Amino acid sequence: MAKTPSPKMGTEAAIDKQLAPQPENAKTQSLAQHTADAAGEQMNTNTGLPINDDQNSLKAGDRGPSLLEDFLFREKMTHFDHERIPERVVHARGSGAHGVFKLYKPLGEYTKAAFLNDTETETPVFVRFSTVAGSRGSSDLARDVRGFATKFYTTEGNFDLVGNNMPVFFIQDAIKFPDLIHAVKPEPDNEIPQAASAHDTFWDFISLMPESAHMVMWAMSDRALPRSLRMMEGFGVHTFRLINAEGKSSFVKFHWKPLLGVHSVAWDEAQNISGKDPDFHRRDLWDAIESGNFPEYELGLQIIPEEDEFKYDFDLLDSTKLVPEELVPVQRVGKLTLNRNPDNFFAETEQVAYHIGHVVPGIDFTNDPLLQGRLFSYTDTQLTRLGGPNFQEIPINRPIVPVHNNQRDGFMRQTINRGKVSYNPNLIGNNDPQQVKESAGGFVSYRERIEARKERLRNRSFFDHFSQARLFLNSQSDPERNHIVDALTFELGKVKTIAIRERMLGILLQIDKGLATQVAYGLRLHLPESPSTNQSIPADGDPADYQSVQAEGTLAKSEALSMANTVKDTIKSRKIALLTADGADAASIKVVKDALVAEGATVELIAPRQSYITAADDTQIIVDQSFLTAASVLFDAVYVAGGTNAVATLEAEANAVHFLNEAFKHCKPIAVADDALQVIGATYFSKKIPSDFSEASVLREGILVGKADKNFTNLLIKMIGQHRFWEREKPRLIPA
Ligand code: HDD
């Protein structure tokens, strides 16, 4: 009898992790000074007193009451009682990772920022990804915008790029941000629903604010359901400025382009994942980094000469607009690699504090009214969240350069500042710390000339609310567009107030009549006679001055806006389920698994029972999960292995059949050993198996049946690279 193989588990795996070399850089070294490791150490109190008994509190007799004297108990319990801090008011749910940024080519022509001119040094970074609406413990797979915040620890101080995975935003002026967030968060009377925009208050607000139309198209698209945090784009959203050494300014839009492409999951799948594994994105990020599949994104810049400020049919200061890549191409200037998981979630991911106002010389702001308001909010919010003004001293937030200024004291001050002087100018301390000349790297705000009246107004250039929403919609592939229709019908279907549904139809009508008609059909409502108007109007404002301007827009379509045009030539880090059972054909399992693993994918064997299967040749093969713990929604593709007895077992195993039905429903690649076809016979899609397995057919249908040889695995790899076969959704007859 063959010996049962023993996978590395528990302590053994943990020890391997400790011994794995950690990438070193200036930030990891600075964090190391604050990192504690209890391995081999004795237990003591916060004051250093060795602890003898951590099991029993001090009592009057072995059955008597506990004593107030028990300072050991009190210290432990007091600390525990105060372990929680307020979650972020938005973006509460997040996952972080360390990494490095390496520049491809110096950008001195545009910016003097040191880290954008030095191609030798790797700049340490800490990235935090997030959802927006849900609480800290909510599911990763909510339909939502994703935050993509990057802290660059540069030699000139921290630069924070606090972006999202969508290039535009719901509102144009930061004064509306509290309203937007109050509307999308759970409703205040019953705190329902969690991490969802599908409720009355959100759509009430949106239906009255046509400026949100463009962002709503993005939020209702598959971009709001990323397959992985490693497979989504990032955007700085606002137009920023780059300033070169001569003081010349250019406008810039920041982008992150994932090297694995931009991919999403299906909405039904997202809802399923939320139950099966609410930590799906967090786990995926963690596992990818642990296994050396380091997430990579290229930094992209759209640079716009200052003279072109008024060249476009939208305002560069309007955050509800993007700059189409056809008009200004994205230059890829460097690469971000996430290569280390945090040691401690709270100390790093939870305590990291980003701020759009953390800039370095060479990067500056524009007058985008959303950006300007954000400049206030980020430091302000940390004061409550992190408990006072010294949050910059928390290890994850410290720059890699020493900090010297005259700020002093406050709750939890860590630094012990020497000397009498904490003011400037001073004689006693030689005026130290000294201010820095601009020529030596001192930050000087861009000298923008402003001649204006002080008033609460919005320029007319901000009132074309629909042309880019239409551009986005028209740039989608058919399946992507269908998903937007479905998402709107779902979300508005959850809205109870019919007047809000109707108002939203009156907004959609102004984006695209076809879209409005399709959504109205699903809701069984008539299209409204007149379009919904803007209701975001000051008390003394004339409503006529606030209505949307109807414009065509210069572009009919933008390729970059559709995920159908994304990278589809890699299966690196994709998860493939290999369904099998006792009596399997070991040789074909090996051929398929080896071929996929060689391409950087992960293959998990799933069988009726845990631990291992005994193959037809009596060898034992490790099983990663049973059908009880595994679910199709957690995988990218599925292969059904052959072997007479195994196939008979799978055919009769309801969970295996359900697994396949779901994979089909979510348009995933399905491959089957030629002798395992009877398992497909038990699925509801058995009649949809194509008769021809030519490359063209396989890459159209996403179904492959055959002998596990080189040709088979090559085709399988191409199929998985395609990600999904969305065309399969058309018949809409899919159960599971
Ligand atoms: Fe914000 C957090 C991104 C508009 C106010 N925001 C926050 C985070 C991201 C963004 C990624 C999470 C940072 C982290 O992981 O810790 N926010 C954006 C983008 C916006 C935007 C891309 C539009 C372009 N935000 C925005 C406005 C305001 C805020 C208009 C207020 C005026 N955002 C905040 C905040 C948060 C925040 C309340 C909550 C937690 C935090 O700052 O640190 O200050």
Image (cartoon, rainbow, N blue to C red):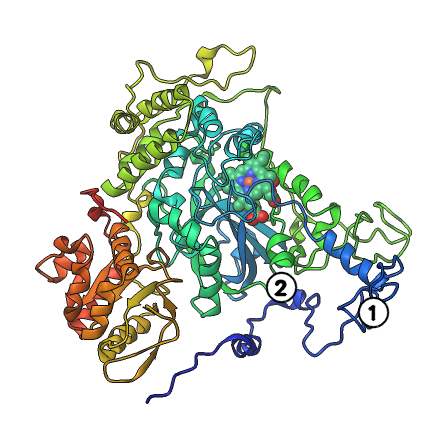
Q: Quadrant for ligand 1? A: top right
Q: Nearer the viewer, mark 2 or mark 1?
A: 1
User: Horizontal placement of 431 versus 210: left or right?
Assistant: right
For the point 56% across and 57% down, the residue is 126
616 vs 407: above or below: below
Label 1 crowd bin: few (<14), some (14–19), many (20+), radius 10 Å? few
Residue 393: x %, y % from top left: 72, 55
Residue 450 in sight = yes
Q: Earlier in the sequence, mark 2 or mark 1?
A: 2
Residue labelled with disc 2: 27
Label 2 – label 1 distance at C-alpha: 28 Å
Q: Quadrant of residue 633?
A: bottom left
Q: What amino acid is at disc 2? A: Lys
Residue labelled with disc 1: 48
Question: What SS does tag 2 mark?
Answer: helix
Residue 726: x %, y % from top left: 24, 48
User: Horizontal placement of 54 versus 690: left or right?
Assistant: right
Q: What amino acid is at disc 1? A: Gly
